[in-house]
Image (cartoon, grey):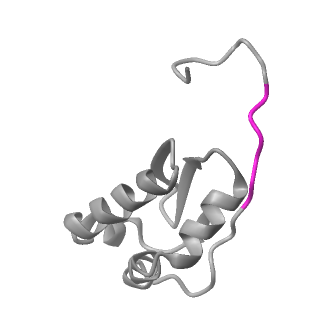
Amino acid sequence: MRVSGDPRAVEAFDAATLQGVADRGKAAGAIRHRFFTNGGEVLVIDEWPDRESFQAFFESETDIANVMAAAGATSPPTIEFWDRMDVSESINWD
């Protein structure tokens, strides 16, 4: 998921709320979850068992919209789905 916004606002967002989103995501099937930034955008990379699990979670999770609003997002996030490739050169990715 990629969205324009202020990454510092995401980092400063209520930690308990962010942890709640992460906990509910894990309960819904999330395997990995991490935030990244290039300074003007926030990129969230998740690993899920399948697209349907992520979509069901994302559509039901209201706190994600609150985080995006706090970050000043002015448009919906771009969500892309990528499939893992079987290549042996991975470093520290199981």
- Decide which of 35, 39 is in the foreground and name it: 35
- Residue at 49 percent of width and 75 percent of height: 5
- Residue at 41 percent of width and 77 percent of height: 71
- Decide which of 65, 20 is in the foreground and name it: 20
Q: Is residue 87 above or below residue 15?
A: above
Left or right of 2 in this view: 32: left
Residue range in magenta is: 80-85
The dominant secondary structure in magenta is: loop
* Quadrant assignment for the N terminus: bottom right
Q: Residue 51 location in percent, x, y?
A: 71, 56
- Decide which of 73, 19 is in the foreground and name it: 19
- Residue at 37 percent of width and 57 percent of height: 22
- Decide which of 94, 40 is in the foreground and name it: 94
Left or right of 75 in this view: 72: left
Magenta highlight on residue 46:
no
Left or right of 71 in this view: 87: right
Residue 47: quadrant of the picture: top right
Work out which residue is located at the far top of the displayed protein and give it: 88
- Residue at 37 percent of width and 82 percent of height: 70
Q: Is residue 68 above or below residue 85?
A: below
Q: Is residue 48 above or below residue 4?
A: above
Q: Residue 15 location in percent, x, y?
A: 22, 64
Q: Residue 14 location in percent, x, y?
A: 22, 71
Residue 94: quadrant of the picture: top right
Residue 21: quadrant of the picture: bottom left
Q: Residue 13 location in percent, x, y?
A: 27, 71
Total labels: the figure holds 0
